[in-house]
Image: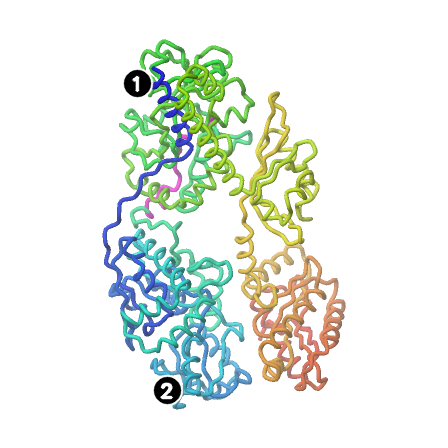
């Protein structure tokens, strides 16, 4: 008897701990799929990630049998993929242009975050006009083409472009004037042969893009998305290994593939390659849609695609990533034909799904469907005022398309097909604090157990335990109250919903007394006569990543999910069995292990969410996690007692803060993006969730603050619109902003002040003092511009090279011109030497316009007017301002 009770006690401890986690079936090993990869150059460290993935068995573990195809002259990687002769290819950034032109390809990843492609030259390039009449050998790479296209505006004799032979000797023998090369390759070979050369880097002229794009065919991406994703992950894993073990990968490469380079050359290449593969904190292989669009914008401006092709471009169709759904044509047609899905959802089952006070569908399931909607285009129409029991009956009659989150019971599977479960929680019994634990539901035969009408727990008790008397209630809260009031012995339901309700409504006097071996395996149910919708939703669920699942889980299921084992129960068991000392020690050991595991779990949640606990009255910190200390740079002693609101930046106004407090003190959690400041006054960004905590009397006395750090995401978003060198807005953001500001000015009847500024004889500064000094000069000019145009309505952009654009508003033309004249004086006052200038210091030329609302046209026309004015300023002797005067006559040009 003693032993059996002891076994139950130990089992209950283990079960309660284990069921804190969602169990998931391990995927079966994938079958071996033959995969071929076509490179666009000779075997070298440029493709190290692929070699390492083979060498270390990463492809094999992913179920892929990969063959790396040797490059030969005349092989076109685009043709190889489109024809099916290769499953994947590695190519230049011009592949993005091929897609814009209609090539049926998809982008898997980018091996290089920026291209190492440069031109080798026999003599220094003074300016782009030096390309006049020269022979340039290149591969059709977009960076080189963009550079040459810029040069064509300044040359007198056409450039002779020839396809690359892949033979560096053509450059050494002076058969060509310029030779396209990788910074990681050819310069080393020339140094070894003591051949003099100069570098012409397109990035110095504002031309940049990704390098070594990895593509596959649209057919492959659509028909075998799992294989494509497995290949991408294994290749990234290979790059991680190769960068950490370069010499090992070089030796493997030389032993297994035909290599034209020496080992020393490969080691040198490896040392230079990491900077291109791993750029800052950007993940290996990552691709930014904004950066791709910028590349294609440059291609359009260079004439490689036409306006129609650009307008029809959907860059998201080019990208492949884990969140991308590979839907069949039949599935895509279905979404277009039936975009609205009628959803049968529970209106009162927090935290899984519920309708809030504002009539919005919220909860764990709602967050999943928000993601599914984004990825499929389907619009889910939840119910807002029908009870679950009534909804089930209507769904049986076919009035609704899907169940949002339901257990696949035998009764429901008769008319619904269920996806794989996306949520899993144990079914438990909640009883009064006075009740001891029960070993099973059968102990409650004859007793009254509360269940929510229409829930799986009702069907479960009806089928499994018919002798239990059921008290049917309308919600989880009503079920728990029935236990507290003594109308029911216990409540049977989902552990997650029980914990949420107890915390939300401040219910006390109850605890978990038992658990079923069955779980609430929640899935999406789809009417059996709709297999296409089922397939779409299953694919969408499969696309939700583990990190996304974890974020949703943490948002709704926080510390309340951690079980609290009844210490009184342990004490009573100990008193009853004092004679079994060894067994008692075993229980204590297990209990301590469980307690440690539980605390470890709590600590992990705290650290993962940068958690802090705030006193509701004073809004001061009363507990902080180590992770939050690291995030802010403060020690715990410095934070404890500190006013929480002092951690926010000035962007958080008093009005906004009061609105947040009002919502929290009404008992509702608040969530939103917040910028905070660290001890050293730098900033960080988080998605902040403030969750009110009630005391025994139901009063809010504390507030949990949990966070998701989005600083890096914000930084990347900022990088997408910011020039890396000067930190001004870039040309991409100019393209987005200029038209908007024109339309805004038109709507309000305001004039617009615009100017295009160019540093005079900037090339001379570069040639005399070097590119590093040139970069410093650009930074100084940028700082002068931002300090001179420092109002909230001012925009300053770097357009590329030494050109800058100013977008502002002034009351009249004279005020604007005076301000620009003062800018010219400030630039000269920098006293940057430039002997090419008649003033012997750096100056600027400016084309500008004060455009009345009536004369505001489209962005291209206005840009032309100001660009022409800048040209006139240059022709008139530089260091001056030319204002556009006659808009009507200029329009006729």
In the rendered image, the quadrant that contains the C terminus is bottom right
Dot 2, crowdedness within 10 Å: few (<14), some or many (≥20)? some
- List x then y, in percent, for residue 876: 67, 83
Question: Can residue 101 be found in the magenta stretch?
Answer: no
Residue 515 in sight here: yes
Q: Secondary structure at mark 1?
A: helix
User: Label for residue 207?
Assistant: none
Q: Nearer the viewer, residue 668 or 273?
A: 273
At 40% from the left edge and 60% from the top edge, which residue is drawn? 240
Separation (CA) of disc 2 from disc 1: 84 Å
- List x then y, in percent, for residue 853: 66, 61
- List x then y, in percent, for residue 47: 36, 67
Q: Secondary structure at mark 2?
A: helix
Color encoding of the figure: rainbow
Task: Point out the residue furthest to the top here.
Answer: 446
Kindly check if marks 2 and 1 are in contact, taking CB atoms under 8 A apart as contact.
no
Q: Nearer the viewer, residue 216 or 328?
A: 216
Q: Nearer the viewer, residue 210 or 195?
A: 195
Dot 1, crowdedness within 10 Å: few (<14), some or many (≥20)? few
In the rendered image, the quadrant that contains the N terminus is top left
Q: In this figure, what is the number of numbered marks? A: 2
Residue labelled with disc 1: 464
Task: Relative to 422, say whether 746 is above or below.
Answer: below
Task: Relative to 142, say whether 433 is above or below.
Answer: above
Give whichever of discs 2 and 1 has the lower sequence position: 2
Q: Is residue 488 left or right of residue 338?
A: right
Q: Which residues fall within the magenta stretch?
A: 332-349
Residue labelled with disc 2: 170
Task: Relative to 391, say whether 483 is above or below.
Answer: above
Question: Can residue 334 be found in the magenta stretch?
Answer: yes
Residue 390 in sight here: no
């Amino acid at each position: 008897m003693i032993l059996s009770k002891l076994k139950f006690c130990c089992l209950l401890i283990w079960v309660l701990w284990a069921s804190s986690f969602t169990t998931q079936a391990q995927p079966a090993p994938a079958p071996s799929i033959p995969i071929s990869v076509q490179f666009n150059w000779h075997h070298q460290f440029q493709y190290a990630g692929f070699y390492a993935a083979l060498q270390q068995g990463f492809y094999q573990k992913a179920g892929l049998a990969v063959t790396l195809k040797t490059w030969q002259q005349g092989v076109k990687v685009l043709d190889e993929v489109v024809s099916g002769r290769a499953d994947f290819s590695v190519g230049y950034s011009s592949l993005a242009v091929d897609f814009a032109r209609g090539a049926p390809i998809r982008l898997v990843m980018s091996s290089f975050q920026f291209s190492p492609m440069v031109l080798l030259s026999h003599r220094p390039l003074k300016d782009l006009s030096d390309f006049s009449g020269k022979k340039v050998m290149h591969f059709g790479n977009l960076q080189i083409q963009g550079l040459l296209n810029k040069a064509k505006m300044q040359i007198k004799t056409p450039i002779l472009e020839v396809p690359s032979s892949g033979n560096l000797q053509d450059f050494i023998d002076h058969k060509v004037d310029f030779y396209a090369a990788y910074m990681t390759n050819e310069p080393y070979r020339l140094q070894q042969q003591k051949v003099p050369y100069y570098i012409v880097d397109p990035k110095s002229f504002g031309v940049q893009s990704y390098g070594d794009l990895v593509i596959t065919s649209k057919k492959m991406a659509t028909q075998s998305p799992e294989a494509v994703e497995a290949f991408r992950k294994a290749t990234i894993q290979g790059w991680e290994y190769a960068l950490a073990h370069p010499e090992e990968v070089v030796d493997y490469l030389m032993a297994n593939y035909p290599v034209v380079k020496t080992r020393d050359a490969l080691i040198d290449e490896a040392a230079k390659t990491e900077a291109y593969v791993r750029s800052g904190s950007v993940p290996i292989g990552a691709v930014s849609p904004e950066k791709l669009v910028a590349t294609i914008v440059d291609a359009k401006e260079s004439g490689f695609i036409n306006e129609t092709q650009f307008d029809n471009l959907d860059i998201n169709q080019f990208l492949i990533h884990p969140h991308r759904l590979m839907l069949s044509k039949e599935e895509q047609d279905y979404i277009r034909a039936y975009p609205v899905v009628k959803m049968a959802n529970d209106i009162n089952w927090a935290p899984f799904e519920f309708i809030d006070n504002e009539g919005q569908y919220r909860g764990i399931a709602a967050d999943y469907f928000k993601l599914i909607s984004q990825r499929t285009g389907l619009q889910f129409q939840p119910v807002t005022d029908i009870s679950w029991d009534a909804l089930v009956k209507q769904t049986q009659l076919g009035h609704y398309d899907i169940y949002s989150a339901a257990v696949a019971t035998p009764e429901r599977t008769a008319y619904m097909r269920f996806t794989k479960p996306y949520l899993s929680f144990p079914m438990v019994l909640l009883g009064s604090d006075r009740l001891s634990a029960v070993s099973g539901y059968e102990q409650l035969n004859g007793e009254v157990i509360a269940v929510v009408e229409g829930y799986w727990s009702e069907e479960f008790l009806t089928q499994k335990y018919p002798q239990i008397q059921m008290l049917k209630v309308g919600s989880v809260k009503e079920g728990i109250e029935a236990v507290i009031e003594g109308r029911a012995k216990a409540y049977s339901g989902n552990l997650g919903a029980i914990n949420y309700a107890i915390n939300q409504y401040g219910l006390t006097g109850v605890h978990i007394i038992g658990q079923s071996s069955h779980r609430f395996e929640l899935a999406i149910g789809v009417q059996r006569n709709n297999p296409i919708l089922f397939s779409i939703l299953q694919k969408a669920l499969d696309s939700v990543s583990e990190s996304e699942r974890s974020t949703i889980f943490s948002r709704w299921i926080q510390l309340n999910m951690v079980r609290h084992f009844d210490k009184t129960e342990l004490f009573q068991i100990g008193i009853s069995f004092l004679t079994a000392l060894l067994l008692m020690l075993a229980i204590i050991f297990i209990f301590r292990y469980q307690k440690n595991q539980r605390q470890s779990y709590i600590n992990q949640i705290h650290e993962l969410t940068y958690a802090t606990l705030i006193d509701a009255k004073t809004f001061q910190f009363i507990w902080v996690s180590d992770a939050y200390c690291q995030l802010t740079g403060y020690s715990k002693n410095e934070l404890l007692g500190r006013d929480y609101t002092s951690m926010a930046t000035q962007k958080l106004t008093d009005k906004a803060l009061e609105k947040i407090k009002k919502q929290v003190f009404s008992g509702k959690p608040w969530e939103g993006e917040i910028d905070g400041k660290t001890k050293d006054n730098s900033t960080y960004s988080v998605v902040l969730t403030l969750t009110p905590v009630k005391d025994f009397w139901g009063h809010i006395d504390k507030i949990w603050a949990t966070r998701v750090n989005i600083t890096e995401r914000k930084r990347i978003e900022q990088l997408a619109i910011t020039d890396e060198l000067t930190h001004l807005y870039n040309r991409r953001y100019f393209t987005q902003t200029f038209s908007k500001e024109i339309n805004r000015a038109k709507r309000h009847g305001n004039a617009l002040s615009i100017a295009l500024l160019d540093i005079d004889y900037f090339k001379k500064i570069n040639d005399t003092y070097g590119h590093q000094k040139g970069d410093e000069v650009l930074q100084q000019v940028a700082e002068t511009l931002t300090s001179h145009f420092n109002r909230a309505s001012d925009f300053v952009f770097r357009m590329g090279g030494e050109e800058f654009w100013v977008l502002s508003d002034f009351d009249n033309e004279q005020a604007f011109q005076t301000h620009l004249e003062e800018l010219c004086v400030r630039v000269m006052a920098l006293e940057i030497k430039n002997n090419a200038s008649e003033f012997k210091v750096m100056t600027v030329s400016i084309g500008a316009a004060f455009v009345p609302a009536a004369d505001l046209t489209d962005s291209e026309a206005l840009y032309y007017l100001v660009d022409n004015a800048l040209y006139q300023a240059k022709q008139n002797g530089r260091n001056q301002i030319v204002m556009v005067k006659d808009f009507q006559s200029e329009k006729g040009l």
